[in-house]
Amino acid sequence: MQLRPRRTFIFAPGLDPAMFPKALASGTDIVCVELEDGVAPKDKDLARVRALGLFSEPQVDDGVERVVRINCVREAFGLADVQAVLATDTPPPVLMMPKVRTPDEVIWLDDLLSERGHQTRLQVIIETNQALEAAYEIAHCSDRITALFFGGVDMAAELRCANAWEPLLYARSRVVHAAASAGLDVIDVPYLDLNDLAGMVIAARQAKELGFSGKGAIHPKQIASLNEVFTPSDEETARARRIIETFEQADTGLVVIDGKLIEKPVLRDMYRVLAIADRVAT
């Protein structure tokens, strides 16, 4: 699976294609074209047509990951989204699946995409109680999955708890564990208070320490600060290069660097560090 930075994501409205280029130029790693909660039911059909139309022409290789968030596949709007994706010869490179409950939903979509011959990857939001219980199985159910997203707002409502760090720590930890077990990136819910950048940075650092790869943004002004939190320092980048070079030269499962024993499983994280550093350097 290709490693790439997923430090930040931001939504672009499917109903307004003019916002797509602006989102791509915002500095984020992921732009997600929105067809779900951000689109009123009366506008779903038009948004779907406009969103998929964005991919009718080849996309520029600018390092920004393009994603379309479809509606829940258990609902009529979601089924219509899937049918439209299957009908086009130019599908989005990635589909984001909201309100997933079981691995079966992901497997079903994977099978349909395979039958159609689409190479579209999948990203799954864990935001329901059922998905939280099945997070490990969901993370492992399809080779198309590249990342899990933690949907904190919906999860807090499902758990009947406050949408705050400590009440959601258990749920976040379950999602991080599931993603890490499958070698997937895991992205935290956006910080909703636009006027509290300092609080957002604290929340982002907490997420990073817990194991998250990145965090969502609701406004472009949040992106630079979030990217800074999830970007490795020069020292971390240099250490990653040393570890990778040492392992490549040693051809063994463990090495000693600066007196510390380092085992081979850390290599994936070191490659991710370099992927982010390379993205920053471009």
Image (cartoon, helix red, strand yellow):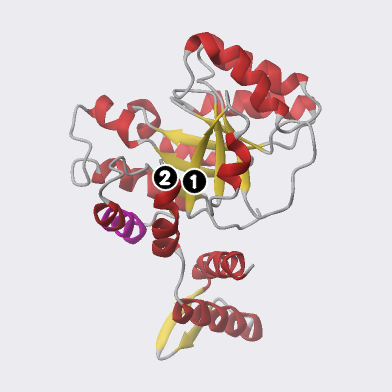
| Res. 142 visible in picture | no
Question: Which x, y percent locates residue 120?
Answer: 69, 36
Q: Quadrant of residue 54?
A: top right
Q: Which residue is located at x 51 percent, y 15 percent?
A: 74
Question: Which x, y percent locates residue 125?
Answer: 45, 34
| Position of residue 216 in the picture relative to residue 162 (left or right) | right
Mark 2 = which residue?
Answer: 217
Q: Is residue 203 above or below residue 277?
A: above
Question: Which x, y percent locates residue 75?
Answer: 51, 12
Mark 1 = which residue?
Answer: 9
Per the picture, the main secondary structure of the magenta-coloured stretch is helix
Q: Quadrant of the C terminus?
A: bottom right
Q: Is residue 94 above or below residue 235?
A: above
Q: Is residue 15 above or below residue 59?
A: above
Q: Quadrant of residue 174?
A: top left
Q: Residues within 10 Å of mark 1 (few under 14, many from 20)?
A: many
Amino acid type at mark 1: Phe
In the image, the segment drawn in magenta is 202-210
Amino acid type at mark 2: Ala
Q: Is residue 175 magenta?
A: no
| Position of residue 90 in the picture relative to residue 246 (left or right) | right
Question: Tag on residue 70?
Answer: none
Q: Which residue is located at x 22 percent, y 46 percent?
A: 165
